[in-house]
Amino acid sequence: MKLRWLIVLFVSIAIGILAQKDELTEIPQEKVMTHKYTNRLAQEKSPYLLQHAHNPVDWYAWGPEAFEKAKTEDKPIFLSIGYSTCHWCHVMERESFENEDIARVLNENFVSIKVDREERPDVDQIYMNAVQGMTGSGGWPLSAFLTHELEPFWGGTYFPPESRWGRPGFKDILLEISKFWKTDRQKLTEAGKEVGAALQSRSRTSAGMKTLSEETLRRAFAAFRDLYDPQYGGFGGAPKFPRSETISLLFRIYRRTGEKQALAMGMHTLDRMARGGMYDHLGGGFSRYSTDERWLVPHFEKMLYDNALLARAYLEAFQIDGNPMWEGVARETLDYVLRDMTAPEGGFYSAEDADSEGEEGKFYVWTEGELKPLLSGEQFQAVKEHFQVTPQGNFEGHTILSFKEGTPWASRYSEPLKSAIKTLFDVREKRIHPYKDDKVIASWNGLMIGSLAFAAQILDDERYLKAARKAAAFVTSRMWDGKTLKRRYRDGDVRFDGSLDDYTFLASGLLDLYETDFDPKWFSAAMALQKRADELFWDDKDGGYFFTAAGDPTLIARSKEIYDGAVPSGNSIAALNLLKLYDYTLDDAFSKKAEFVQKAFSEFVSSHPQASPALLMAVDYATDDSKEIVVAGRSSDGKRKALIASIHHLFLPNKVLAANDPAQPASGVPLAEGKTEVNGEAAVYLCQGHACRKPVTKLDDVLPDLKASKTYKIY
C-alpha cells in the first residue's frame, strides 16, 4: 500500500471538513406502529441490527440489495460495524444515527449498511484491517466508506456528531466525502484499490521457514517479562485486557523450565484481576477489560468468550497449586454463565451490555447510602471494609466493589460477608438488567463447552458436564449438518456459514468434552469438523488456514490470522487440534498440517512471539514429550473413575486421554482400540511417542513418567 499517498488523502478529507449548511428535504414519516421510522433492519434477527431498525437512517443489511442500490444511484457506501453490547456504538447511535439532520445527509448521499461484527466476522475483519492500516488504530463502532467494488477508501471508529476538540464531526465528514465523491472520485477509487491490494497481501505467509522451537518460547517469556506490571499484574498499561492465553502459556513455560517468575506473573495477574472491579463480586464473571491499570474500573460489558477463557486459566492455576481462590473464582464465573447466559435449548448467549437505563455500569455500582439500609450493622461494616466502600466512591460518585488488597480471599466466604453478598445480589437482581444479546455463536459456544468440560474434570461437578453436553448436542444438531457449520442461531433462525474459528473452536471444545465423558460421538464430531476446516480453509500452497472459505464475491480479501486478540486465532487452535488428533489416530496428515501451520507463520511469530501465545501453546505441545493415555475398564467401575479423576486433577496440558470400555469395544478412537483391563481390573496405558508401556493398575506406578516433560532452560 502506498501509505504516504493514502495518508495525504486521509488528511485532505479531514482538513476539508467544514461545518456546511445544506438545504435538505425532510424524510417522510413512516406510519409503522408507534415508531416514527422503520427501516429494513426490522426484518433481521441480529440484536444489533434490530437496535437500529427505527433509526431515521435508511439502513440496509450487508447484501446485494444495498450493493445494487449504490451502483444504481451512483452513491458511495457508508459501512457501520458494531455489536449489540458495545457502549460507544450506543453513543454514536444516540448522537448521530438517531439525529434526523445527519440521517438526511446519509440518505441523500450514501447507501448505509449495518453489520453485526459477531454475526459477520468475515466482513468485520476485512474492514477493521483496512481502517487500522489507514489510521493506525481500530475499534467499534467501525466506520468505513467504500466504492461500488466494496473497496474501502476512508474510515475511522467513533465520530462525534459535530466537530469538537480537534476531532472531525460525523456530519462534516459525510459532507466532505460526498463532495470528494462528486468532484474527485478518481482519488477515492485509487485509494480503495490500494487498500484492497494491501488486504490481499495479508494472506501471504512464510512457507519454507523453519519450525518454531523452544527458542521462540524463550523469546516469548522475555517479551512478557518486559510487558509485565509487577505492581498490579497484567501485561502493558491501561486499558488492560485479561490475556488468558498469555497466562496459560506462562504456566506451560513454568512446567517445563521450572522458571518461577513465569508462574508468579500468571498467578499474580489472576489474583489482581479477581480482586478488582473487573470481576463481579456479587454475581460472578468478568467484564471485558479494565479501563485503568489497577483492574478497578471495567468496561462493564460481559462477553461469553472472555469468561470461557478466564475460567480455564483459573482452573489451570488450581491444578498447579490447589489454591481454593482459583477454584472459587472459576466456579462463580461458570455459575454466572449457567444462571444468566444459558438458553433453554442449551446453547450459550453471546454477551451482556455495559449499559442499563442509558448509563454505563449502572447495574453494578452502589453508593454508601444505598448499602447501609440494606444490611445489618455487622454486614455493612464487613462490606465497607472488604470492598473499600467510601462516601465519595471510586467511580463517578459511586462504588465499584473491589476486594481490599492483602485481605485473605477466604474471608469472602465467611459470615457476615457471605450473607451480605447474597443480600446485595438479591437486591441487584431487582434492578433493570443490562441488555442481553441472546444469539448463539458457534465458536464462542465451542470455547465455553471446552471450559465447562474442563471444569467437570477438575472440580468433579456433574452440573458443568451436563451443561457442556447439552450445549454440544444443541450446536451439533442445530448448527452443523456434517458438511456446513453455521455461525449463528437466534430465535429458531440459523444463518451465516462458519469461519475458521467456528470450526476449530467447536472441534477443540468437543475434544475436551470427549476427554470428560468419553462418548465417542464427541470425538467423531471433532474430527469431522477439523477435516471439514481443512477442506474449506487450508492453503495448499503456502500453508496455514484462511479465515474464510473461498467463493464469496462480496468479500474482497481472504486473510490468514495468527494474532491472538480477544479470542485466540483459528490457526492457533487448529494447530493444537491437529496435534491432538494425530496422537489419537496416528494419521500423518494431521501432524504434517500442524507443522506446516507453524512454518507458515514462523517469520511473524519469531519476531512477535508475544502476539501469538495460543500458537506457542501448540509449539510447547509439539516440542514436549506428549503423552497418550488410555484408561481401560467398565464405565461403571469405581476404580476406573478414580484413575481418570486422578489424571484429570494433574496439570498435564500436553496429553490426550482416551478410555475403553470392554462392554463397548467399538470406541471409534484408534488410540483406545485393543486396550483392555488387566486381570479384570481397570488399567492405565501410558504411551509416549506412540510406544505404549505395559499397562498398570496403580497410577503411582507411572506417575513420575506421566508428570515428566522434555525440559529446556529459559536463558
Image (spheres, rainbow, N blue to C red):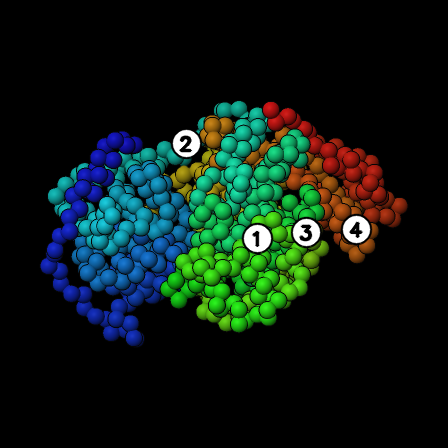
Residue 661 lies left or right of residue 65; in this view the side is right
Query: Which comes before the other along the chain, label 1 or label 3?
Result: 3
**Disc 3 secondary structure class:** helix
**Disc 1 secondary structure class:** loop
Q: Amino acid at mark 3?
A: Pro
Residue sitting at the far right: 679
Query: Which comes before the other along the chain, label 1 or label 2?
Result: 2
The residue lying at 12 percent from left, 55 percent from top is: 21
Q: Looking at the picture, how far across and down is residue 478, in whole percent?
A: 53, 59
What residue would you read off at disc 4?
642
Q: Amino acid at mark 4?
A: Ala
The residue lying at 31 percent from left, 56 percent from top is: 92
Q: Looking at the picture, how far across and down is residue 59, in whole percent?
A: 28, 59
What residue would you read off at disc 1?
404
Separation (CA) of disc 3 from disc 2:
46 Å
Select label 3 or label 2 by which is in front: 3
The residue lying at 25 percent from left, 41 percent from top is: 153
Q: Nearer the viewer, residue 707 or 344?
A: 707
User: From the viewer's perspective, is residue 2 above or below residue 83?
Assistant: above
**Disc 4 secondary structure class:** helix
Residue 95 lies left or right of residue 370; in this view the side is left
| Residue 346 can be seen, yes or no | no
What residue would you read off at disc 2?
204
Mark linked to residue 324? 3
Separation (CA) of disc 1 from disc 3:
18 Å
Query: Which comes before the other along the chain, label 3 or label 4?
Result: 3
Badge 4 density bin: few <14, some 14–19, many ≥20, Cα 10 Å: few
Q: Amino acid at mark 1?
A: Lys
